[in-house]
Amino acid sequence: MSPKPLVPFFALSAPALTAIAQTASPAVVEIKGSLNVINESSQASTATRTDQSLMDVAQSVQVIGPTLLEDLQVRSLDDALSLVSGIAQAPTRAGTQDAFVRRGFTGESAGSVLRDGVRSVQARNFSATTERVEVLKGPASTLYGIQEPGGVINVVSKAPLARARTDLQVDTEEAGGYGAQFDHTGPIGASGWSYRLIASTEDRDDWRNFGVTRRDLVAPSLAWRSGGTEFIVSYEHTDYDVPFDDGAIFGANGRPIDIPRERRLSEPFSHVEGKSDFVNTRLQHAINGQWTARVNYAFNQHRYSDWRVRANRYDEATGLLRRRVDGRQGVDDNSHYLVADLVGKFRTGAVGHEVLVGVDHERTLGRTMGELTRVTHDGFDTVNPVYGQIPVPTEIDDETRNARSLLATTSVFAQDSMALGERWIVAASVRFQRYRQEEGAGLEFVETQNISGSKVLPRLGALYKLDPRLSLYANYATSFVPNLASSPTQGAFDPTEGRSLELGSKFKVDERVSGTVALFDIEKKNIVVNLDDDTAQAIGKARSRGAELDLVGQVGDRFSVIGSYAYTATEVLEDASGLKGNQLPNAPRHAASVAAHYAPGWRTGGLSWHVNAAVRYAGEREGDSANSVTLPSYTVADLGLGTAFKWNGTSLKLDLLLRNAFDRAYYTSADGAMRVLVGTPRQLGVRLRSTF
């Protein structure tokens, strides 16, 4: 397939830019406030479900705000979270879903990615609607119920604004194809209502030898604000078609087999197509100066079908590969969520209270029409591949028909953050959660799981302010996740439970640099890991211990920077199948990143220039629970150059971004030696953006 030509941004060659420089208005650039990056990283509703300052929260919380997302040209949740310590990429179902390792533990299907505080069933959660990304480290089950102990990720959406604004963006990259975004918001007269409409489309050729990603999104929203009352309703619809990419194969020597990294080992028909919907309604009313009532109802749904060709067995002597064909048909995952709570701020004597009490109910239902019958095909030549020799599968395995999984929970929760004088803050929270879990499948439906139970989930934290810019904290928290089956015929496992201890410090330097240092110890039992045959097994108990550093700041008026480092040591503590002593998969012991944006004030006529760079490092990590394959460490750098100007009175920004600037071969995650995700090679991208 010949790549699509680049959208003709490259027509803005040196002579063209010179002409623009000569004619553009000299008053061209809005210099952002020097404290934007600091201010955007100091508040996060995820931490306490209130507006409490993060300097007062006894837990590590990181925020990637809109300034950093724009300046660093973040295009995916993977990009955003590469800036946060303790987060690594997990197997992403062949590059089609968000999946992350948090403080050593993986939980891609456990709802640990939230959309506006609501558990998401979407495949991808970062889009043109994203305002910022918040990461709460450690267990969050007292606030959000079913969660992994490593932390929770909250993707916060853009809301309607009371002032008119329009953003337009188009981009392209070296592999071919394009992306475009439209974002328009404003008031509806003087009624108190405002609106926002966001739309985006992308049609991108993959950098590998075949495959095209197509995704279309439309997201309208309305808001009404009057006095102490705010009502927001939003809707987002996405259609997509994405190729499966199981990546590379690692041989017996522990290295990738000797073929070009661009070469796919699947077939052109190996892809997933689907659509998703997300409806969110939020009502907030200030009852008086102390109490605020809130109600939130959300519905999200993800429907898809896929056809997958994956490596099954490799003969190193001949270079021939056995491949397996399978897939899922008619998958429909949906979730209803309702929460009502009260937030109060008051004093009892010398003690200041910030109280949260509430109740929530969630019902998540997954249905699958069936799984395609698994068929293996021998003789694929990895050196001289010939595609199109195997048929597209159509037959469904009767045992997997009508698969159904239901998880329903109802909870009450309470939290009190108590200010004891000017220096001490003690926070205590608890959740009582009841749950019901049902699963089954088959042409003649057979129920494989029907359990119910309840759980009390406490959290306790304390923070001591040495001065307004430096604090020490400690917390203890618990987590709980019912284990859904990985195969409709297998049934579920006992629920996963976790507990975490964390010690840390938060600091600010001259109100321009802020940071968090954290030490943690997490234990998790009843861990379930996926096997190559798409079944799973429980591995008993595991532990993760480590240290993290996160920094963000504005050094001078024109230079912003964000950096992180994580040391994570994982170990399987108990296991009956021989995994005791192993490391947990895809969790690097050492990882670091630094990214910076610099607007030095250089001008060429009416052009004002800026540069940005990002470097990320991940150490060696195991590629499966058996520790049979080790992924090598890597260091990857991205370099960017851009200019801002006005053209006929319109403000424009033109940015170039060279991803993987030194063209390093690297591997981001693995699900065994047959499925090793390959990092993107050097790619030049161009983005043109206008705001008016």
Image (cartoon, rainbow, N blue to C red):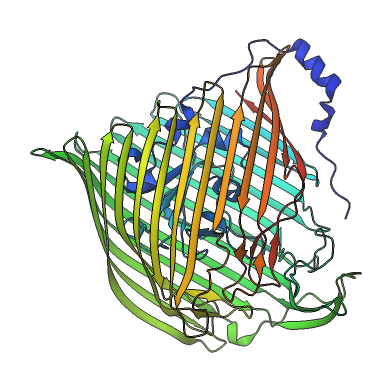
Question: What's the residue at 63%, 17% (across, down)?
Answer: 601
Quarter of the rendering occupied by the N terminus:
bottom right
Q: Is residue 106 visible?
A: no
594 and 279: which is toward the camera? 594
Tell me what residue is drawn at x 33 percent, y 38 percent.
55
483 sits to left or right of 392 = left
Residue 41 in picture, x, y percent from top left: 44, 37
The answer to whether residue 285 is above or below residue 379 is above
Give the side of residue 415 with respect to residue 481, left or right. left
Q: Residue 100: where, in percent of width, then height?
A: 54, 58
Image position of 375 (left or right of 334): right
The answer to whether any part of residue 107 appears in the image is yes
x 33%, y 36%: residue: 470
Quarter the C terminus occupies: top right
Residue 421, by quadrant, is top left
* Circle count: 0
The quadrant where residue 628 appears: bottom right
Picture layout, residue 399 above or below residue 652 = below
- Pick the residue in front: 255 or 415: 255
Q: How far across and how far down the image is residue 162, in percent?
A: 44, 27
The answer to which of 206 and 478 lies nearer the viewer is: 478
User: Which residue occupies the foreground of this view, 643 or 216?
Assistant: 643
Looking at the image, which residue is at 84% across and 60% down? 260
Q: Position of residue 620 (x, y in %)?
A: 62, 61
